Amino acid sequence: MSNSYKLDSIIKVDESLCIGCGSCIRACPGALITKKEFPVPIEDSWDQCIDCGHCVAICPTEAMHQRSMGPEDCHPIDIHQVPQWEKVKQYLMTRRSIRTYINKPIEKEKVEMLLDISRFAPNGANRQVLHWVIINDPARVHRVAELTIEWMKEMKETNRALYDEARLQLFIDPWEAGQDHISRGAPCIIMATAPKEERTAPPAAMIGIHQIQMAAPALGLGTSFTGSINTACHWLISMP
Ligand code: SF4
Ligand code: SF4
């Protein structure tokens, strides 16, 4: 987003460019824009605007400016870049969870590109609640796997129901034999976190992570969900 926009209302229209089409009014999910001579925000709209940018994106003449973004921040849709069904189907049907990795760190730029694209995923009224933990170091990823195994062994003694239901022995046995079925040799972990009380966090995290997973192959990267680490973390933060 541009830092140059610091409006004192949620929108401002360049009247010399506005053609009065009303698209911004129809596109606003909160019905926060009304028409006088030109589009204007309704009263008390400041706290209701979710900064989605629909009003800016849909404006055909670049007349609309929103408090945190302008036309230059909203990329126009290039219909020729939208993949056709056969390509979408082929891409989605051939997606695989990767469980064999090359053990070297990911380029920092690639991680940043993935995090940046994840913020465009649907995330609950555009609340952008996620914080990201990045462990981009094979040795540290291995240590996370080791800690997860230690947690599993603790569950064997203290929470047999979870241990059996999650079949944690299936991770411990290979580990003892020198095989890491937790991280599978991945060099990098990308973990989404959010405040415990944030009600939109679970779906936002899943969708945000999924967005990263779908984008990663375009950067030559494979991915998989690490349910075991996730289960351990969830259990630990749920402890009273
Ligand atoms: S940014 Fe979204 S919510 Fe805010 S005025 Fe524009 S369309 Fe409405
Ligand atoms: S979408 Fe743009 S051109 Fe159309 S009414 Fe709104 S500001 Fe004016």
Image (spheres, helix red, strand yellow):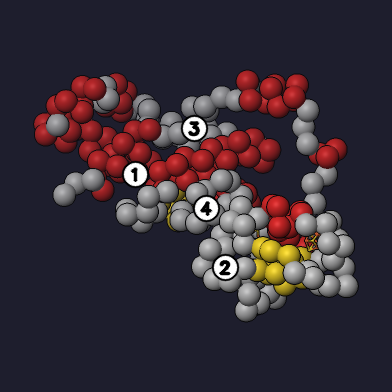
Nearer to the camera, 52 or 99: 52
- For ligand 2, the image quadrant comes to bottom right
Q: Position of residue 115 (x, y in %)?
A: 57, 51
- Asked which secondary structure carries label 2, the reply is loop
Distance from label 2 to label 4 (Cα)? 15 Å
Q: Residue at 56%, 46% (x, y): give it.
A: 122
Is label 2 within 8 A of ligand 1 (CB to nearest ligand atom)?
Answer: yes
- Asked which secondary structure carries label 3, the reply is loop
Depth check, mark 2 against mark 1: the one in front is 2
Q: In the rendered image, is residue 20 in sight? A: yes
Distance from label 3 to label 4 (Cα)? 27 Å
Distance from label 1 to label 4 (Cα)? 36 Å
The 10 Å Cα crowd at callout 1, few under 14, some 14 to 19, many 20 or more, is few
Q: Is residue 113 left or right of residue 195?
A: right
- Asked which secondary structure carries label 1, the reply is helix
The type of residue carrying mark 2 is: Ser
- Residue 143 numbered mark, or none: 1
Q: Is residue 59 left or right of residue 119?
A: right
Is label 3 within 8 A of ligand 1 (CB to nearest ligand atom)?
Answer: no
The type of residue carrying mark 3 is: Ser
Q: Which residue is mark 3?
A: 224
Q: Which residue is mark 4?
A: 125
Q: Residue at 46%, 45% (x, y): give it.
A: 205
- Residue 45 numbered mark, or none: 2
The type of residue carrying mark 4 is: Ala
